[in-house]
Image (cartoon, rainbow, N blue to C red):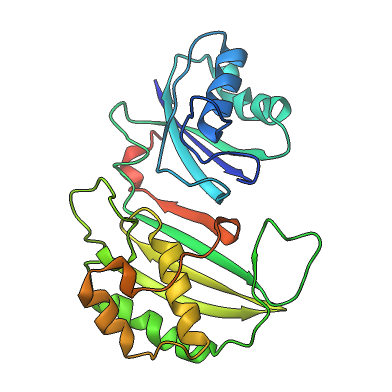
Amino acid sequence: MRYFLTFAYNGTPYHGWQRQPNAPSVQQTLEEALSTLLRQDIAVTGAGRTDTGVHAQTMVAHFDVELSQEKEANLAHLLNRYLDENIAIHSLKPVLDDAHARFDATARTYQYHLGFQKHPFKQVLHYQIPTNLDVERMNAAAQILLEYTDFESFAKKHSDVKTFLCDISYARWERIDQGAIFTITANRFLRNMVRAIVGTLLEVGKGKISVEAMHQIIQSKERGEAGYSVPACGLYLTEIHYPERIYKK
């Protein structure tokens, strides 16, 4: 039986999602917890990879195991009791045998959190940037992203990908109390793409890059033309969308 596990995590203590040889990761922590509770080796496959320090309000991973009805009903609760405060399990759902947490995802949403004032309790949960930003200009530049599909300019150099094509369906900044949040949705994301886009939009908001320059930056397909990559601490994976057909009723 294949299951989708939905959960959240604070990425601060982990070296990203993917298992590492000499550093703690979210994947390793989940696999060890499941293997201990189920008394067999369990391997999990995530919906994607997050870098060191990146957080997830919603992450999905699949794994295969035979569970009794009682064990299936209680596993999420048992995992929450076993895991520390950095990972919270939301749900466990049976899916079709060929359902895949990564390849069946139709869209993903990320948010980037900015703080405009020093905050002793949020230093690792947002990017503090003590400056006045023109959010209207940043939103105008963000809308230009929706006109393109090739985002090589915002991809990490030497990325091992076959294509830089992504379909961005939403990109917008929203002011909040003492900060701002950028939300972006696409069918797929390149490594470091969101952090590079945010860094570029911040340069627009500071008046260092014009709104119209976004066209030139994207068309150049050169990472050096875009802005800096903002720190991982402000980035959150917030939603992953799947077709309903993959879930067992």
112 left or right, relative to 139: right
In-front residue for pair 161/184: 161
Q: Residue at x 54, y 90 (%)?
A: 134
Q: Residue furthest left?
A: 162
Q: Nearer the viewer, residue 211 or 238?
A: 211
Q: Quadrant of residue 98?
A: top left
Residue at 60% of width from left, 45% of height from top? 11
Image position, residue 222 (x, y; %) = 26, 68
Q: Position of residue 57 (x, y in %)?
A: 58, 51
Quarter residue 94 falls in: top left
Is residue 141 or residue 244 the one in the foreground?
141
Of residues 60 and 166, the one drawn nearer to the viewer in this rendering: 166
Q: Is residue 139 above or below residue 150?
A: below
Vertically, is 26 above or below 125?
A: above
Most extreme residue toward the front is 224
Identify which residue is drawn at 39% across, 64% down: 185
